[in-house]
Image (tube, grey):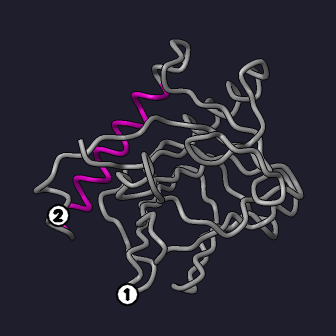
Amino acid sequence: MSEKFSELQPGSFVYALPNALDPDFCQQVIGRFESATDQHHQGAMGPGAVVDDTIKRSTDLRITGLSQWRDVDERLLKSLQHGLSLLSGLHPFFSSNAFRDMGYQLQRSAPGEFYRWHVDSGPGPLSQRQLVAIWYLNTVSESGGATEFFHQQVQVRPEAGKLLLFPPFWTHLHQGETVGAGHKYIATTWVCFA
């Protein structure tokens, strides 16, 4: 595991931690995802699981609560805890408050798929979110597939094992760029107050 977050642009509050997950582990998760087709569902948004393929087009699998995915859930939690520990060295807010995750989801984006401009906070249960966590499970070297931040003018290329942490608020409007070739695999959660 890497020991240093880098802020991708000064003042952006978009942080990347390379090698937060072992690439071999990432490949195993991708293989298991591909074998679990009976657990796949169309990409949905928000607490109401709204499906709108003009905004989000992907194949998702929520792993939290599924016994056969407990080991992956625990590895993601361990990686997140390590990331938050490192982040607390940069921002005392994260060491002076208690946090928890909101469960983990895997997502596959095939060529032509995307997640258009959005934020990850809002009313109701979304209001507790303090950070977005995205782990890239594979490297996407072809065009497309990057995570773009509108106001920060930051673009993040998917690299296997990299963890991305950023605020979920209106300040961090972002999108998963349309995948050009190959597939993009990610794991996600949100960090909220415990």
Q: Is residue 76 magenta?
A: yes
Residue extent of the magenta highlight: 72-90
Q: x%, y% of residue 96?
A: 10, 56
> In the picture, residue 79 is in which quadrant?
top left
Q: Are marks 1 and 2 in contact (CB under 8 Å)?
A: no
Q: Which residue is mark 2?
A: 93
Placement of 39 over or under 57, stated as above or below:
above
Choose top left, top right, bottom left or bottom right for residue 94: bottom left
Per the image, label 1 sits on a secondary structure element best described as loop
Mark found first going from the N terminus, 1 or 2: 1
- The amino acid type, in three-letter code, at marker 2 is Phe
Q: Is 18 in front, or is 7?
A: 7
Q: CA distance from mark 1 to mark 2?
A: 18 Å
**Residue sitting farthest toward the front:** 124
- Tell which residue pokes out farthest to the top in this image: 67
Crowd around label 1: few <14 · some 14–19 · many ≥20 (10 Å): few
- On residue 18, which mark appears? none
Magenta segment's dominant SS is: helix
* Residue that label 1 marks: 10
Pick the front one: 61 or 25: 61
Residue type indicated by callout 1: Pro
Q: Residue at x 50, y 36 (%)?
A: 104
Question: Can you name the residue that lies furthest to the left here?
Answer: 96
